[in-house]
Every structure is written in structure tokens, then in C-alpha cells.
Image (cartoon, rainbow, N blue to C red):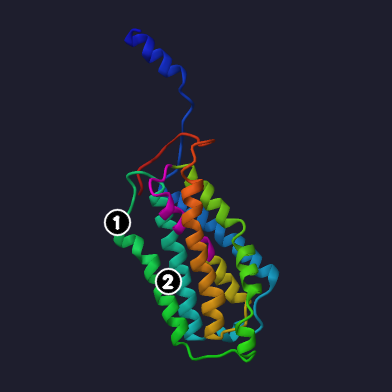
Amino acid sequence: MSSDNIIESLAGDLQPVQRLRGVERRALLWGGFALFCVSIGTYVLGARPDLSQKISDPAFLCQSALLVLIFVFSARSAFHLSVPGAERSASARMLPLLGLLLWACLITTNSGHSPSGAAESMNGWHCILRMTGLALAPAPAILFMVRRAAPLSPGWTGWFALLSACSLAILGTQILCANDDPRHLLLWHFGPVLVAGLVGIHLGRWLLTRDCGRRPALWTSPR
């Protein structure tokens, strides 16, 4: 077979290529979508009755700020890891993990207790249901968006994807949940976010490495 025949056979199998938007733009688009979904869900479910007092509580504000940072840095890491050549440094990937550690420290050092008592602190399945409901649209959306690229570290990509979606969802849950007992926050707020990230590792290895149905794409350099 001549070289011309080989080129013609290869060219005959080519499929149209769709160029993806830049990494930062895609992360921003998903972040806006996630914020919209969680905001609407929180509004529909109804905020905690003492929210006007909690927004002046330093512990509540610090925890909320950390959740926002985890949401932002995890989303950026997920989208950067999904594009070969755009991966960020290991130190940048450690920022969400540092945020998780600081969040756990804030919870354990907070001496405040909910008036509902210890019994309520051990019953928080409703918080898991709220977090799951608020992340029901953002989580599949970010997995779909990073799947369209070509993540070389699917486990890490899945970890950051679900960590970002669930950290924002648990922020909405904290606006809904009036129980500030540290045991409740550690077990039913921090715990589910950590577990969701670990699930994302296995989900990423399964979903983000599958070749069936993947569409070829070209990537623009991150800006």
C-alpha cells in the first residue's frame, strides 16, 4: 500500500473536532451554574430561622468562607487536570486539602452547642439528603464537562470535581441547618463532603477513563 493510500484511509476515518473553551472560562461557567442551582435550592427549602444572627457569628462566617474557597480551588483543579498540559502544580492542588483541614479545625475548636442537644447532633440524615439534593445538578454537570476533555489523572479529577460540588452544596445546607453542635457539623457536614470526594476518586477512575462515546476535542491554552 502506497503512502497516498495510507493517508487517504486515515483521512477517511477522521471526525469533526469541536474546540473546547479555555479552562478558566469553563470553570467559571460551571461555577456560575452551580451557584445558581444551590441558591435556588436553598431559597426553595427555606433558610434557618436564625440566619440573620448567624451572619454576624465569626465562626459561621469563617466556615462559610472556607467552603467557598474549597469550592473555587477544587473546581479550578478539576478543570485544569482534565486538560493535558494545563495541569497545575502539586502545591495548587493541595489548597483544597488545606481548606478541608482548616474547616475541620474550626469545627472542633468551636465551643458553641445547639440548644437541640446531643441527641439532635447524632441525627443528621436530613443534612445528607439536603446536600445530595443541592448537588444533584452541579455534580453530574462538572463530571460531564471534564469528561469531554482528556483527564490524565481521572482519580484526582473526580476527587476535585465532587469535592467542589459538595462543598458548595454543604454551604447551602449550613444555611438551612440550625444545628451548630460541633459533633453534628463534624459528622454530618464535614464527613459527607469528605466521603463524596473519596467516591469521586473511584467514580473518576471509572467514568473519566471510558472511551465509549467520548468525543474528540481540541483545547485552547489556559489563560
Q: Is label 2 in a helix, a strand or a loop? A: helix
Q: Is label 1 in a helix, a strand or a loop? A: loop
Magenta run includes residue 50: no
| Viewer-closest of 16 and 198 | 198
Q: Would you place residue 11 above or below residue 183 in this image?
A: above
Magenta run includes residue 155: yes
Disc 2 from disc 1: Cα separation? 19 Å
Q: Quadrant of residue 1?
A: top left
Q: Main secondary structure of the magenta part?
A: helix
Residue drawn 35% across the image and 43% down it: 84
Side (left or right) of 48 relative to 79: right
Image coordinates of residue 125 in percent, x first then y, are 64, 73
Image coordinates of residue 103 in percent, x first then y, are 44, 76
Stretch in magenta: 150-166
Type of the residue with mark 2:
Leu
Q: Quadrant of residue 122?
A: bottom right
Is residue 164 visible in the rendered image? The answer is no
Residue drawn 64% across the image and 85% down it: 120
Residue drawn 56% across the image and 59% down it: 34
Type of the residue with mark 1:
Ser
Query: Which of marks 1 and 2 precedes in the sequence?
Result: 1
* Residue density around tag 1, few if under 14, some if 14–19, many if 20 or more, within 10 Å: few
Q: Which mark is residue 100?
A: 2
Q: Which residue is mark 1?
A: 89
Image coordinates of residue 150 in percent, x first then y, are 42, 42
